[in-house]
């Protein structure tokens, strides 16, 4: 809640230096039963600069994880490019990908499934090192001990099995494994959503701390906008495999332009007495990525949709510095704090400043 | 046995008999060890002469003492051969043949199952079609035809059984591996640049171990029965070899006059099969229990 020493420098999220990792117009489709196409990701562009944190937000099924896994080249994209350090890795084969895999690592959502239950922690952490011929057994052991120290686990953890650790500790192990080869870029796919709330902050702080110290580019994927706002420089909001809004974190959260972003924001609880948040509850389920709605993909659930939205698809427009939105009526949807105002409450200065989502 | 102990520090050597914690498994291991020990003991005292027939002592009941003062503990058969010695000498024929076959079955079945699970597209289709088409053929008939073509003997029978019986295991291993390959640690390993073979050997295979053990124990029993059946039908071990199936086959004509000729080899087969099944059940139960206690 307190205004902590946050990196809210004016230029937060406004850097213009070249990207370390850039996905350009990424398009991923899967074959659905019946020969139909499932459009998991449709022309998403995300860029991360060295030492920058970018949050990718969207609800379940919006294609966030597919973006992560495609960038990691678990899938080959159907269209678009993935530039890593200026090199397009979208269609490289496994042999040419190997050197890149060392520099581009991933933390998975579920630390219960991402660590082999039969492997000791030493073996888990050594796996990427061995795969990349890191060095002698002794060098590898030293590196493993160092990694454990970096993520704050006791040195004797190496002998133990994953089942002897809690979820939070397991996620630390997963982070340590991602750090093993001194990556330049880490993709964290829902790194805390399977953890207790009390543990989430630890892992988030660990990631942020490591990122600042090691100047790693970080792409955080999550469905919790408040959490992403807490650590990201920039935020990209996804809906049904498409990008709907993008901008510096404070901008997106403070002045959301797309009705979907507003709806996501209104789902965040307000940490103050009487601040009875008027939630915008989206009706219906997210539509199927096989049978997508016409026009704007969001129109069947959008509170401010008009006739035009049903037929014409809004393009992703630049509406300011590093700020993009895909909506015909961008900004017309009242942001959560205005919604509170509509409830007839007199606004305090604090409320006008918007919800403190960082706590 | 658990990998938990592998990375552990040195521990004092213990002389306790390891307890597996499963009654079935313990019972199965005890009976099976007794059977095997009894059979192995033949090399301590059995001489070739003991297997010779004595026509003066044909079809004698258990406990018969012949003119030379030799006691035939389990009686004699139609050629006056001692049944106890013969059932002991049947070890390499019955347990040996099915033992070799089951190792072969486990090896081929696991390999093919893994190949089918790891690859997609054409390779998987071919594997699954191959499995289905071999399973579709009646096993015993297929084995009979092959043995009839290539002849009897230890190796022809064991290899034939091994090469025909693997699809059932392959199918189970395939299904199980598909599940294990869904785990995120497999994807993680791939994304770290680990190659296919190490992933299969070190991530997937250890997870398959309980399944392989259980299937192998059951298949050992099944193959033992099939070997006996082949011998019984006259296409198993060579005619005079003391295979348990051969002995059963011999007993057919004397069922009324000398029922022990049937009971002795039958007891050997039944005790082996039951103990192997108990071992299989026990391993299955243990892995289930451990699965609950330890991990997802």
Image (cartoon, coloured by chain):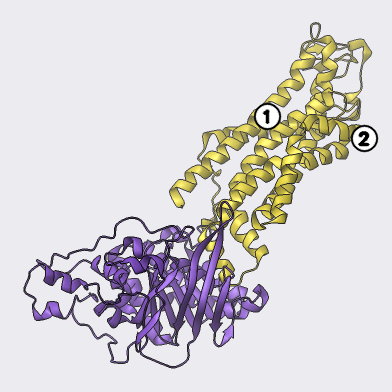
Chain colours: A purple, B yellow
- Image quarter of residue A76: bottom right
Left or right of A300? Residue B285 is: right
Left or right of A140? Residue B83 is: right
Q: Secondary structure at mark 1?
A: helix
Residue on which disc 1 sits: B273
Residue B111 in the image: above or below residue A85: above
Give the crowd class for mark 2: few <14, some 14-19, many >=20 residues within 10 Å. Answer: few
Q: Position of residue A275 (x, y in %)?
A: 12, 68
Q: Residue furthest top?
A: B257
Assess whether mark 1 and mark 2 are in contact (beta carbons under 8 angstroms): no
Left or right of B117? Residue A343 is: left
Residue at x-position 85% and y-position 36%: B157
**Which of the pair A65/A144 is nearer the observer?**
A65
Q: Earlier in the sequence, mark 2 or mark 1?
A: 2
Chain letter of disc 2?
Answer: B
Q: Is residue B41 visible?
A: no
Q: Is residue B110 visible?
A: yes
**Which of the pair A265/A126 is nearer the observer?**
A265
Q: Position of residue A250 (x, y in %)?
A: 28, 82
Q: Position of residue B276 (x, y in %)?
A: 65, 34
Q: Position of residue A209 (x, y in %)?
A: 36, 81
**Which of the pair B211/A316 is nearer the observer?**
A316
Give the crowd class for mark 1: few <14, some 14-19, many >=20 residues within 10 Å. Answer: many
Residue A229 in the image: above or below residue B172: below
Residue on which disc 2 sits: B149
């Amino acid at each position: 809640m307190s205004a902590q020493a946050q990196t809210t420098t004016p230029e937060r999220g406004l850097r213009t230096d070249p990207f370390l990792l850039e996905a350009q117009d990424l398009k991923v489709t899967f074959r659905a039963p019946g020969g139909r196409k499932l459009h998991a990701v449709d022309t998403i562009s995300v860029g991360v600069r060295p030492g920058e944190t970018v949050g990718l937000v969207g609800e379940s099924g919006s294609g966030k994880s597919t973006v992560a896994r495609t960038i990691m080249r678990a899938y080959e994209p159907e269209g678009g490019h993935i530039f890593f350090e200026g090199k397009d890795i979208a269609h490289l084969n496994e042999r040419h990908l190997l050197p890149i895999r060392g520099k581009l690592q991933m933390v998975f959502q579920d630390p219960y499934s991402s660590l082999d239950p039969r492997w000791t922690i030493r073996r888990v952490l050594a796996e990427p090192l061995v795969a990349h011929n890191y060095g002698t057994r002794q060098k590898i052991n030293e590196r493993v001990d160092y990694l454990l120290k970096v993520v704050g686990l006791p040195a004797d953890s190496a002998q133990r099995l994953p089942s002897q650790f809690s979820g939070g500790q397991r996620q630390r192990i997963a982070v340590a494994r991602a750090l093993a080869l001194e990556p330049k870029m880490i993709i964290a796919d829902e790194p805390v959503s399977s953890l207790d709330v009390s543990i989430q902050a630890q892992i988030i702080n660990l990631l942020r701390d490591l990122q600042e110290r090691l100047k790693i580019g970080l792409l955080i994927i999550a469905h919790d906008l408040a959490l992403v706002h807490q650590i990201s420089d920039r935020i990209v909001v996804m809906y049904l495999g498409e990008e709907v809004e993008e901008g510096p974190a404070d901008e997106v959260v403070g002045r959301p332009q797309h009705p979907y972003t507003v709806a996501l924001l209104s789902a965040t609880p307000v940490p103050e007495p009487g601040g009875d948040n008027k939630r915008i509850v989206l009706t219906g389920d997210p539509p199927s990525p096989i049978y997508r709605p016409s026009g704007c993909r969001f129109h069947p659930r959008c509170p401010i949709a008009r006739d035009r939205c049903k037929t014409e698809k809004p393009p992703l427009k630049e509406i300011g510095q590093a700020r993009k939105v895909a909506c015909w009526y961008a900004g017309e949807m009242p942001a959560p704090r205005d919604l509170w105002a509509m409830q007839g409450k007199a606004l305090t200065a604090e409320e006008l400043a918007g919800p403190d989502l960082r706590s | 046995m658990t990998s938990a102990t592998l990375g552990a520090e040195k521990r004092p050597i213990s002389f306790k008999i390891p307890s597996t914690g499963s009654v079935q498994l313990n019972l199965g291991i005890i009976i099976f060890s007794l059977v095997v020990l009894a059979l192995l003991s033949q090399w301590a005292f059995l001489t070739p002469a003991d297997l010779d027939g004595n026509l003066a002592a044909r079809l004698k009941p258990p406990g018969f003492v012949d003119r030379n003062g030799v006691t035939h503990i389990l009686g004699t058969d139609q050629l006056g051969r001692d049944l106890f010695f013969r059932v002991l000498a049947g070890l390499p024929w019955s347990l040996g043949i099915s033992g070799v076959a089951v190792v072969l079955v486990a090896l081929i079945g696991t390999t093919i199952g893994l190949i089918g699970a790891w690859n997609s597209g054409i390779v998987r289709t071919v594997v699954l079609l191959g499995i289905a088409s071999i399973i579709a053929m009646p096993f015993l008939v297929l084995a009979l035809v092959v043995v009839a073509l290539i002849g009897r003997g230890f190796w022809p029978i064991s290899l034939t059984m091994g090469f025909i019986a693997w699809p059932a295991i392959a199918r189970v291993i395939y299904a199980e591996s598909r599940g294990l390959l869904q785990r995120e640690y497999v994807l993680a390993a791939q994304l770290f640049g680990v190659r296919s073979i190490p992933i299969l050997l070190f991530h997937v295979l250890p997870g398959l171990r309980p399944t392989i053990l259980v299937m192998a124990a059951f298949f050992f029993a099944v193959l033992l029965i099939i070997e006996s059946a082949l011998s019984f039908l006259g296409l198993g071990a060579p005619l005079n070899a003391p295979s348990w199936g051969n002995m059963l086959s011999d007993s057919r004509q004397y069922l009324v006059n000398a029922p022990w000729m049937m009971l002795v080899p039958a007891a050997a087969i039944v005790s082996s099969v039951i103990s192997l099944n108990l071992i299989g059940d026990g391993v299955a139960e243990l892995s289930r229990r451990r699965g609950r206690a330890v991990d997802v």
